[in-house]
Image (tube, rainbow, N blue to C red):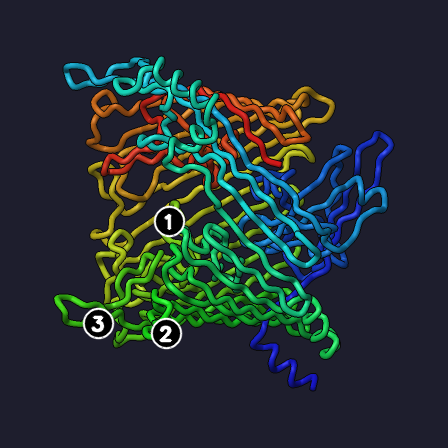
């Protein structure tokens, strides 16, 4: 019997690890909480929560004999929401006293620290709904910082452009209406979006040559009296609407969840790949939805008992009408995985895309994904591998009364139309294999991946909402990559690393539909090297930095910058100084320099210098400057309307802990280093250490505020 279950588990799902949170009261009235994650086989574990700004400030946990732990002091009355990030995988603490929906198809662990410290903590979820909200209210005024004169040149000026109020408010109700019947409902109460100038600013109170300030204020005051939610809801463009709806039943043997509309499909990570994206909606066109059936903890414990604890299982079957993300196409994803003897993990997944009509669901099967994953630990070595195979069908269309079969065009993908009968089946395949060696001195990973010319993976976003998750997982179409990531720590204070990779065409005899990333010469080789270094100056002070250079071998594929074409370019660089101070008015200081040269066809490079100071009284102060330099034969700044330099000043403070209310004020001139309004907009928007928004391409596309100034004040609520 044991051998039979061990064999079956090779096809089935994965493991639970022991985790926990404890707390005790300190003499000064504060609470000391200790978080524990019991998986000593993990390489790195981070603690992320609402108290760390989630992943942005995730805290490294200390490894011990039985797992990872971290102790942190909180104010009395604190309720924390948190998750662990174990070797890059988000993991819920299943031993937490309570849970709350994370809005992405999973759960956040939640703990009332006062109750735990007082000995009143239950390991089981409590019945009852909990209210959460993520709401933002902001006033912004924008000004044109340069103006075109009669001579066609741009002169410095400050002319009022727009004034507006912005509001985003989402009300969330999650928990259990009765024990074991979870419910999650999210209502978009107000969703007033920026005008057609992108993130430049709101203009519902005033817009030059279009809306008089007096009329805008009359409209606002009238609607504030008679129908405020309608006004803040976007004057009918968005209104108030049901965003997410999920419910289900948890039996322990089988847990069932169903979702509708913007409810996210429960995420799944298959070793190296996210194979069910945390951003994939049940059906954003107000149709569609999904069912999700998963084996529960009682089933898992039963199997562990039958196998002397050597096998952990999980099985998921999820039929849905979400295969196109809009909610029109029927489909399914299903996976089974198993952790065997603590050291081997196997994951097998199937995705299917079917018809769009209820009575013809299986008449045509347009896409099948078969995905296999394996992770094994062998002493200091960890092996990871994934393999993907697509099986495509044809789509039947009728033109002029005649029926034809056309190639399938996968939804939310970069693949485009595919041939369901290719001669070379490797065009429908992708893989990623890597091996890591780790000890106290060095961590070294080497690997290889490839993606065929029409290899796709369903339920992973590409192109929507500026997400490139499919390319993040599989890479560009018809490319192969040899890569490494090597880090050494010669001393406790110093760490040195390098991340190189070499890319070439995978199948030299074909081209992909992705023209922007298709090598013109079949023999082109792209080499990218990214060195990095970190130095711990003291227990409270550290500095780290990185750079990135690229070399491309063939002239047809040279990098284009202005009118120059180059084989070798310096892509980007970053340097960060971070310090904390005790018994000082200045509690924290971060200084970040970034250089963004880009590798695409661009006109400008950007140098940015950002500083953020956290004061002991709770105020957070920010300042930044950005300097643009143009490449060869690009018009001077006075002819383009692009400012050569800009700066930003900002401040924020949590003014109410009970309702997590933060006051925000910013002044921006030709430079916007901040997140979009409502999206933690008091934080810098960074990709590593470079500004993730100030790109000006050869086609003239620009980010917001490249030639404007803005004043912003507002409040953010997240509780």
Callout 1 touching callout 3 (CB < 8 Å): no
1 or 2: tag closer to the N-terminus: 2
Q: Secondary structure at mark 3?
A: strand
Mark yes or no: residue 648 visible: no
Q: Quadrant of residue 207?
A: top left
Q: Quadrant of residue 213?
A: top left
Residue 573 versus residue 145 in the image, above or below: below
Toward the right, the furthest residue is: 27
Q: Residues within 10 Å of mark 3 (few under 14, many from 20)?
A: few
Residue 170 versus residue 329 in the image, above or below: above
Residue 55 versus residue 631 in the image, above or below: below
Where's residue 289, x and y in %?
46, 58
Where's residue 373, x and y in %?
51, 69
Please give the count of numbered marks on the rendered protein.
3
Q: Label 1 vs label 2: CA separation?
A: 27 Å
* Residue topped by disc 2: 362
The image quadrant where one finds the C terminus is top right
Left or right: residue 118 versus residue 343 is: right
Left or right: residue 86 versus residue 475 is: right
Q: Residues within 10 Å of mark 1 (few under 14, many from 20)?
A: few
Instruction: State which mark lies toward you, 2 or 3.
Output: 2
2 or 3: tag closer to the N-terminus: 2
121 or 35, which lies in front?
Answer: 121
Left or right: residue 596 versus residue 33 is: left
Q: Secondary structure at mark 2?
A: loop
Q: Quadrant of residue 482?
A: bottom left
Left or right: residue 335 versus residue 340 is: left
1 or 3: tag closer to the N-terminus: 3
């Amino acid at each position: 019997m044991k051998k039979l279950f061990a064999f079956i588990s090779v096809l089935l799902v994965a493991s639970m690890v022991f985790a926990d949170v404890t707390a005790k009261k300190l003499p000064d009235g504060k609470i000391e909480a200790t978080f524990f994650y019991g998986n000593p086989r993990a390489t790195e574990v981070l603690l992320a929560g609402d108290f760390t700004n989630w992943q942005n400030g995730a805290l490294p946990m200390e490894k011990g004999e039985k797992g990872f732990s971290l102790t942190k002091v909180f104010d009395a009355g604190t309720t924390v929401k948190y998750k662990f990030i174990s070797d890059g995988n988000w993991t819920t603490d299943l031993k937490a006293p309570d849970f709350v929906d994370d809005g992405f198809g999973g759960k956040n662990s939640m703990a009332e620290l006062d109750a735990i410290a007082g000995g009143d903590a239950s390991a089981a979820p409590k019945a009852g709904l909990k209210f959460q909200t993520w709401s933002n209210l902001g006033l912004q005024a924008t000004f044109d910082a340069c103006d075109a004169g009669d001579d066609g040149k741009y002169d410095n000026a400050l002319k009022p452009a727009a004034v507006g109020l912005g509001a985003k408010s989402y009300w969330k109700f999650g928990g259990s209406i009765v024990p074991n019947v979870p419910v999650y409902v999210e209502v978009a109460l107000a969703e007033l979006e920026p005008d057609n100038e992108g993130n430049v600013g709101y203009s519902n109170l005033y817009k030059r040559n279009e809306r008089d300030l007096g009329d805008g204020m009359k409209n606002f005051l009238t609607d504030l009296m008679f129908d405020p939610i309608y006004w803040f809801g976007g004057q009918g463009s968005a209104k108030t609407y049901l965003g997410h709806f999920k419910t289900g039943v948890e039996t322990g043997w089988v847990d069932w969840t169903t979702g509708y509309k913007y409810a996210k499909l429960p995420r799944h990570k298959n070793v190296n790949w996210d194979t069910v994206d945390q951003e994939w909606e049940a059906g954003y066109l107000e149709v569609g939805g999904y069912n999700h059936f998963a084996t529960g903890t009682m089933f898992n414990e039963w199997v562990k008992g039958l196998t002397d604890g050597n096998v952990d299982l999980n099985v998921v079957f999820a039929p849905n009408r979400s295969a196109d993300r809009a909610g029109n196409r029927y489909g399914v994803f299903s996976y089974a995985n198993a952790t065997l003897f603590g050291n081997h993990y196997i994951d097998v997944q199937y995705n299917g895309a079917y018809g769009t009509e209820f009575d013809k669901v299986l008449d045509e099967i347009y896409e099948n994904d078969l995905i296999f994953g394996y992770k094994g630990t062998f002493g200091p070595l960890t092996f990871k591998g994934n393999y993907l195979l697509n099986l495509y069908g044809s789509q039947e269309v009728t033109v002029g009364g005649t029926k034809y079969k056309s190639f399938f065009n996968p939804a939310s993908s970069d693949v485009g139309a595919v041939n369901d009968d290719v001669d070379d089946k490797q065009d429908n395949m992708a893989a990623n294999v890597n091996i890591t060696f780790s000890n106290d001195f060095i961590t070294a990973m080497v690997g290889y991946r490839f993606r065929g010319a029409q290899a796709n993976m369903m339920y992973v976003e590409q192109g929507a909402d500026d997400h490139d998750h499919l390319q993040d997982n599989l890479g560009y179409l018809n490319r192969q990559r040899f890569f490494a990531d090597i880090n050494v720590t010669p001393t406790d204070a110093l760490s040195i690393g390098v991340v190189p990779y070499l890319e070439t065409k995978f199948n030299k005899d074909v081209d992909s539909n992705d023209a922007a990333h298709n090598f013109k010469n079949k023999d082109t080789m792209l080499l990218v090297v990214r060195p990095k270094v970190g130095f711990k100056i003291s227990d409270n002070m550290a500095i780290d930095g990185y750079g990135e250079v690229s070399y491309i071998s063939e002239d047809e594929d040279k990098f284009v910058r202005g009118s120059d074409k180059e084989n070798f370019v310096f892509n980007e660089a970053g340097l960060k100084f971070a310090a904390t101070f005790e018994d000082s008015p200045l509690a924290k200081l971060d200084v970040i320099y970034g250089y963004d040269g880009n590798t695409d066809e661009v006109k400008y490079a950007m140098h940015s210098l950002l500083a953020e100071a956290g004061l002991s009284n709770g105020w957070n102060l920010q300042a930044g400057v950005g300097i643009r330099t143009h490449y060869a034969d690009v018009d001077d700044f006075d002819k383009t309307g692009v400012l050569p330099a800009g700066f930003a000043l900002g401040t924020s403070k949590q003014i109410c802990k009970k309702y997590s209310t933060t006051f925000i004020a910013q002044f921006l001139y030709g430079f916007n280093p901040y997140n979009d309004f409502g999206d933690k907009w008091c934080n810098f928007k960074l990709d590593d250490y470079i500004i993730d928004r100030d790109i000006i391409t050869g086609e003239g596309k620009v980010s917001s505020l490249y030639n404007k100034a803005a004043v912003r004040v507002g409040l953010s609520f997240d509780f």
